[in-house]
Amino acid sequence: MPKWTLHTEFKFDAAHLIEGYDGKCGRMHGHSYKVHLSAESNKLNPSKYLETSDMVCDFRELKWAAKDAEKGGLDHGVLNELVKVNPTAERIAEYIYKETDRRIPEGIKLTITVWETENSWVEYTE
Ligand SMILES: [Zn+2]
């Protein structure tokens, strides 16, 4: 069976605090988050921008989270307001997974990796 795996990376800057955290992460602060996203598929699909079935999915759809928070992304946003759960790196990865999954064709296996710092990251998949 054929298999394609798309990979893309992007960064966004955002503020958050971890509610209930006993320590400095409980106070509002910011991170430059890095996100790696992979999308695996055994078939190719059309997209919003290409009518023929020649893509796993559009890179533009995968990178929605890099957009300005005022335009539907996460950049320069307050994650506590956008993610609506306690915005740990784990929850941010889960949120990006679910929001990306509903924007792309069915049958694509996503894996989301979120770096909160250069040395600390989390991977989420379903
Ligand atoms: Zn933090």
Image (cartoon, rainbow, N blue to C red):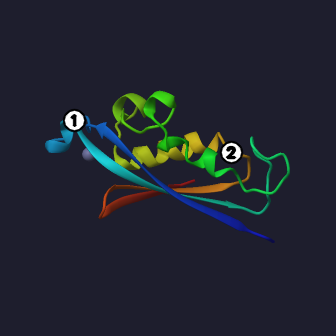
- Residue 12 drawn above or below residue 72: below
Residue 99 coordinates in the image, percent (x, y)? 56, 39
Give whichever of 90, 51 is nearer the camera: 51
- Dot 2: within a 10 Å radius of its alpha carbon, few (fewer than 14), some, or many (20 or more) residues? some
Tell me: residue 104, above or below residue 9. above
Q: Badge 1 local density, few (<14 within 10 Å), some, or many (20+)?
A: few
> In the image as oriented, which residue stretches furthest toward the bottom?
1
Q: What element carries label 2?
A: loop
x and y percent of residue 115 in the render? 37, 56
Residue visible at 18% across and 36% down in the picture: 27
In the picture, residue 25 is in which quadrant? top left
CB of mark 1 within 8 Å of CB of mark 2? no
Q: In which quarter of the image is residue 61?
A: top right
On residue 28, the disc is: 1
Q: As drawn, which residue projects farthest toward the right?
A: 52
Which element carries disc 1, helix, strand or loop? loop
Given residues 117 and 69, the one toward you in this image is 69
| Mark 1: C-beta under 8 Å from nearest atom of ligand 1 | no
Residue type at numbered disc 2: Ile
Question: Residue 86, image x and y in percent?
Answer: 34, 37
Residue 69 against residue 92 in the figure, above or below: above
Residue 99's label in the rendered image is: none
Give the residue number, with chain letter if any, for mark 2.
104
Q: Name the residue rendered at 55%, 42% in the picture.
A: 64
Q: How far from the left and from the top, in percent, is residue 90? A: 39, 49
